[in-house]
Image (tube, rainbow, N blue to C red):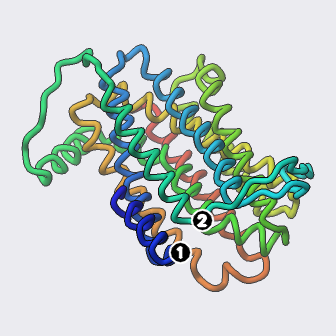
Amino acid sequence: MRNYIAGCFDLGYYCGSVPLSMVALVFVTTMFNYNIHFGALYAFGQELSKPSQYGKISSYLEIQNQATSIFSGAFAALLTGIVAGQKINIVGMNLEIPFNFQKWEMHQIFLLDGITYGISIFLVSLIRYKSPVERVIDTSPIIMRIKTGIAFLKKHPAIFSFGNYSYSIFVILMVQVFMLLPLYVKHHLEQGSDVYASAEVLYSAGAMMAGLFIRKIFRNRNTVFSVVVLLVVTSLIFYMVAFTKSVGIFYIFSFIIGITNAGARVLRTTYLFSHVSNDIIGRTNSVFNVINILLRSLLLLLFSLTWFHGDSNITWAYAICGTFTLVSAYLLMRNYNKL
C-alpha cells in the first residue's frame, strides 16, 4: 500500500493531479490493510498482556482508534482548504473559521499519508516486550492454519455463535456508513453535507465514551448479557430513525450507535481474549471476518436495489438493519447458558 501511495505522489507531481483510478486503488488497498491490521493488532494486544488486563487493553485500543479518527478527520478538513470567515455547521451550531488554511493537492496529501506510515513502522520497530506466555510459532501451510481455526470453532460452537452474533452491530454499521447514511441524509432528511459530517463526529464521540465507560457501566453484568443489551438498544435506535424524520433524533442515533458498536467490540474482544488462546485467535478471527464480509456483501447487494434509492424508501433499509440485530440478540440469548 505504501508503494501505491508513493506512486500516486510521483504521478501527481508529474501530471499535476492524481487520476481517480489511482485514488480508488489506494482506497481499496487501505481497506484490505484495515482488515489485516486490526486482527493482528488485537492478537498482539492479547499476547503482550495478562488476562486481568484484557478489558483495559480492549478499551485503550478503542479510545486510541476513535481519537485518531476524530483528529484525522479534522485535519483532512483543514487540508481541503479553510477560509477565514467561512461558516461550518456542526450539530446545528454555526461555527465561524477564524483563519485561512491553504488547500493541499491530493498528491501532497498522499505524501503526508506515506510519511505517517513510515513513522508508524519506525515506532513499531522500537517496541520491545516479553510475552507472558510461551510462544509457539506455527509453520504449517496456510490452508492447514485455516482448518485449525475451523476445527476449533466446530469444537466450541458456543464461541462460534458469540463471535458471529456479537459482530452484527459492526455488520450493519459498515453498511450504514458506506451506503445508507448519505442516502438517508439526502433523500429522507433532505439535508446537506453538514448533517452528514455532524453524524460522523457524534459517532466518534459516542465510540470514545464507550471506550472510557462501557466496562464500568456493565461491571456487575456478564459479557453475554451486556452484548445482548447493546444489540437490543441498537435495534431500537435503528427503528427510531426508520420511522421518524428528525435531524435531532438522527444525531442521537449517531451518538448511540457509536456507543453500542464500540461497546460491543470492547466486550466481544475481551470475551474472545479470555476464551481463545493466542496461538489460535488469529485463525478464529479470520473465520469471523469472512462471515462478516459475506453478510455485509449480501446486505449491500440487497440495498443496492433501485427501490431503496427512491423517495424515503431508504428508511426500510434501516428497519431491516434493526431487525438484523434484534434477531442476533435473540439467537445469542438462546445460547446464553452455554456461553
10 Å neighbourhood of mark 2: few (<14), some, or many (≥20)? some
Residue placed under numbered mark 1 in the picture: 17
Residue at 80% over, 47% down? 252
Instruction: Give the amino acid at mark 1.
Output: Ser
Question: Residue 152, relative to residue 244: is it above or below?
Answer: above
Q: Residue at horizontal 80%, vertical 51%?
A: 251
Please say if the residues under marks 2 and 1 sit with CB atoms less than 8 Å apart: yes
Q: Residue at x 59, y 18 (%)?
A: 219
User: Residue placed farthest to the bottom in the image?
Assistant: 306
Q: Nearer the viewer, residue 245 or 153?
A: 245
Question: Which of the 4 image quarters holds residue 319?
Answer: bottom right
Taking 204 as reference, is 15 left or right?
Answer: left
The picture places residue 101, in percent across and down from the top left corner, at: 74, 53
Q: Measured from the top left, where is residue 26 in percent x and y?
A: 43, 65
Tell which of 130 and 120 is nearer to you: 120
Q: Earlier in the sequence, mark 2 or mark 1?
A: 1
Circle number at residue 105? 2
**Which quadrant is home to the N terminus?**
bottom left
Residue 203 position, x and y percent, is 69, 46
Check disc 1: other Cα within 10 Å, few if <14, some if 14-19, many if 20+: some
